[in-house]
Image: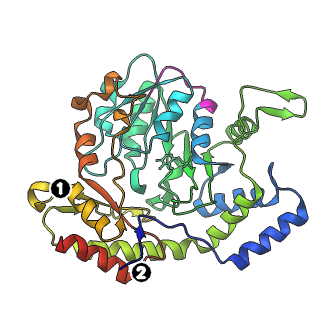
């Protein structure tokens, strides 16, 4: 195949349908600051996701920054090194200290059995990530948070639409944040959101994302500009219309990959849990070099030679970046599972328009070496 296959491609609704929204925005002359499409998207997302309150943002990173600010955290925040760097940057940008805890050996989320030993008298919160859309062990995390009086913010950037026992996992913790970046299952070009559970908290978040304005002459707190505009919001309304179709296509690709690798020694993929409704956001595989006979980097480079661009996501660990490498909790001995998984992983291409032929081609390149 000559055409390059990238790890992802954004889903774009028919341009004709987007133009209808654009015409309306031009007519309204309200292009940002809680316009009509912004209001409509917040309402439709609450209904679709099954959550009480949602505040839209310009992107997921500002949503993370504001979530931490809204909870008025101080001191140390426990988090994972196995994530996108924005998770930990958001802690540092708020003037707080990230404390890394290792990941669990099954789904590679923050390991609840290791959290308690990292808690100090400065700890005020836990910031876990539902990595690849696989739900964290929320019950265990809740139990620890209650025992030590800590807040919990879930980075749910990968987990749009994911449910456990029929309920949205976005209802867990004090707050959850979402990313609607172009690479995500649901995109508004760039975008994000905070899910909150009370009208008071939603107001606080909405004020913070609008500089702290209460009215034209009153500013409370140190706000920021995190607002989503009307073009982004209208894109979100269209994405929502097509979302179930998008997930169906991603599910088909996932099943195809699983079938292709099920008897290959040394290549592992994550299994589904029965009580979870997935969004099939990513398809990570994990290469066991001893069993497979080739390293992760060999496989990655072989794919590249065939115009297939996977992503070694997440490598390197956040704890290896210059801003964090000298932290006490960044020591390799503290993060042995995360170190290992980050050396083994490749995320394979997955997006709604990836054809069955392309998926079979990717499988054959890996299986035939
Ligand atoms: C786990 C995680 N957290 C945070 C973000 C930041 O989101 P955004 O790119 O919308 O700022 C991303 C994605 O980019 C992510 O994957």
**In the rendered image, the vertical position of residue 160 relative to residue 98, given as above or below:** below
Residue on which disc 2 sits: 355
**In the rendered image, the vertical position of residue 356 relative to residue 133, given as above or below:** below
Could you say which is closer to the camera, residue 206 or residue 307?
307
At 86% from the left edge and 28% from the top edge, which residue is drawn? 218
At 38% from the left edge and 78% from the top edge, which residue is drawn? 2
Residue 57 placement (x, y as % from top left): 66, 48
Does 290 sit left or right of 277 as displayed?
Answer: left
Residue 71 placement (x, y as % from top left): 60, 30
Residue 59 - label:
none
Say what secondary structure mark 1 lies in: loop
Marks 2 and 1, how far apart at CA:
27 Å
Residue 16 placement (x, y as % from top left): 72, 79
Q: Nearer the viewer, mark 2 or mark 1?
A: 1
> What stretch of residues is rendered in magenta?
69-77
Residue 91 placement (x, y as % from top left): 51, 31
Task: For label 1, count other residues whose C-alpha is less than 10 Å away and answer few (under 14), some (14-19) or many (20+).
Answer: some
Could you say which is closer to the camera, residue 127 or residue 7?
7
Residue on which disc 1 sits: 295
Q: Is residue 233 at all visible to an observer of this figure?
A: yes
Q: Confirm if mark 2 falls within 8 A of ligand 1.
A: no
First of labels 2, 1 by sequence position: 1
Q: Is residue 2 magenta?
A: no
Mark 2 touching mark 1, by CB under 8 A? Answer: no
Residue farthest toward the top in the current orientation of the protein? 121
How many dots with numbers? 2
């Amino acid at each position: 195949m000559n055409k390059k296959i990238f790890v992802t491609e954004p889903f774009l609704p028919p341009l004709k349908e987007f133009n209808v929204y654009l015409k309306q925005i031009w007519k309204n002359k309200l292009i940002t600051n809680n316009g009509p499409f912004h209001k409509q998207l917040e309402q439709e997302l609450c209904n679709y996701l099954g959550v009480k309150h949602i505040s839209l943002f310009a992107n997921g990173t500002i949503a993370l920054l504001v979530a931490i600010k809204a909870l008025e955290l101080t001191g140390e925040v426990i988090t994972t090194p196995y994530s996108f760097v924005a998770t930990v940057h958001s802690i540092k940008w708020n003037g707080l200290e990230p404390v890394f805890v290792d990941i669990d050996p099954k789904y590679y989320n923050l390991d609840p059995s290791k959290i308690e030993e990292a808690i100090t008298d400065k700890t005020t919160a836990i910031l876990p990530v539902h990595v690849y859309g696989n739900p964290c062990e929320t019950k265990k995390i809740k139990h620890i948070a209650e025992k030590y009086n800590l807040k919990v913010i879930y980075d749910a950037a990968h987990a749009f639409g994911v449910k456990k026992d029929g309920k949205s996992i976005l209802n867990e913790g004090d707050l959850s944040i979402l990313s609607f970046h172009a690479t995500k299952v649901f995109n508004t070009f760039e975008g994000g959101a905070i899910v909150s559970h009370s009208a008071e908290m939603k107001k606080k978040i909405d004020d913070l994302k609008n500089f702290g304005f209460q009215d034209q002459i009153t500013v409370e707190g140190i706000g920021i500009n995190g607002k989503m505009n009307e073009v982004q919001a209208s894109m979100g309304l269209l994405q929502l219309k097509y979302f179930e179709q998008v997930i169906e296509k991603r599910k088909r690709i996932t099943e195809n990959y699983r079938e292709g690798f099920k008897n290959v020694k040394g290549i592992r993929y994550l299994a589904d849990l029965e009580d979870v409704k997935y969004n099939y956001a990513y398809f990570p595989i994990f290469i066991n070099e001893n069993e497979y006979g080739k390293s992760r980097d060999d496989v990655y480079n072989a794919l590249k030679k065939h115009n297939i661009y996977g992503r070694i996501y997440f490598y390197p660990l956040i704890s290896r970046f210059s801003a964090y490498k000298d932290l006490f909790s960044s020591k390799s001995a503290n993060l042995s599972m995360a170190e290992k998984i980050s050396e083994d992983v490749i995320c394979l291409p997955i997006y709604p328009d990836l054809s069955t032929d392309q998926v079979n081609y990717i499988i054959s390149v890996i299986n035939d070496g």
